[in-house]
Every structure is written in structure tokens, then in C-alpha cells.
Amino acid sequence: MEELVTYLARALVDRPDQVELRAQAVDGGTVLELKLAPEDVGKVIGRDGRTINAIRAVLAVAALRRGAKVRLEVLDDRRGPAAPSAPPPARPPESSSAGEPDAGSGTSSVAP
């Protein structure tokens, strides 16, 4: 199955020599981690994830025929080292004059 994923990934990318696949046994199955050149990650993922999902579907059928559980992950080095994401900064509350109704005032602040 590793050969299948490697073959498909190398066929899609501009730098096939930088395609690396690592297999790890996890919870009764295998996790395949696909590492690519940063500029090739989008080619393998595809628009809205369609390409990687198609590869995963083919891999799922191959794994099912062998009675194995396999999961495929694409490692994305473009994001930098894994760091916990910080919440967005708090926005100050919008001020409104006391006594003025917000809805139904008859005026709109939306530009045409």
C-alpha cells in the first residue's frame, strides 16, 4: 500500500524526488505520513481536498482487500513548527447611544 501512495504522489508533483512516506503502527492500524516539497502540497491536496480524498478512497479499498486499517496524512511544513494557536484578539464592543433602537430605525449603513 505504501508503494501505491508513493506512486500516486510522485505522479502528481513537480519534485518527485522529495516525496517521502513514513508508516507508523497505531491502534491496530497504520498511519501513513506523506511529506512533500512545500510547493507540491497543494497539488496533492487538490481543490477542496478532492485529490487527497480520492487517494484516500483508493487506499481504503486496497486496505479493505487486505483486511488492514490505514490512514493517510499529508504533512504540511508550510505552516512552520506546530504551535498552539492563539485566540484572536478581543474586539472592543461597538458603542451605541442609549435610547436609540438598533433595528428598524429606517436607515441603513450598508453602502450600495
Image (spheres, helix red, strand yellow):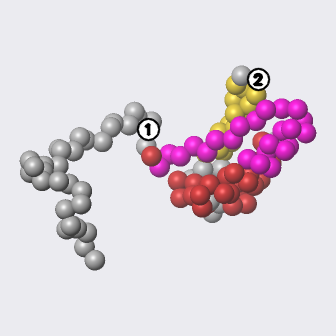
Q: Is residue 88 magenta?
A: no
Q: Is residue 88 left or right of residue 82?
A: left
The residue under label 1 is 81
- On the image, which quarter does residue 62 sit in? top right
- For the N terminus, the quadrant is top right
Q: Residue furthest top?
A: 27
Position in image of residue 112 (x %, y %):
28, 77
Q: Is residue 51 above or below residue 32?
A: below
Which amino acid lies under the numbered mark 1 shown in the image of this protein?
Pro
Q: Is residue 68 magenta?
A: yes
- Check disc 2 and report its element: helix, strand or loop: loop
Which amino acid lies under the numbered mark 2 shown in the image of this protein?
Gly
Q: Magenta segment, which residues?
A: 56-78
Visible in this render: residue 3? Answer: no
Q: Is residue 22 left or right of residue 108?
A: right
Visible in this render: residue 50? Answer: yes
- Marks 1 and 2 in Cβ contact (< 8 Å): no
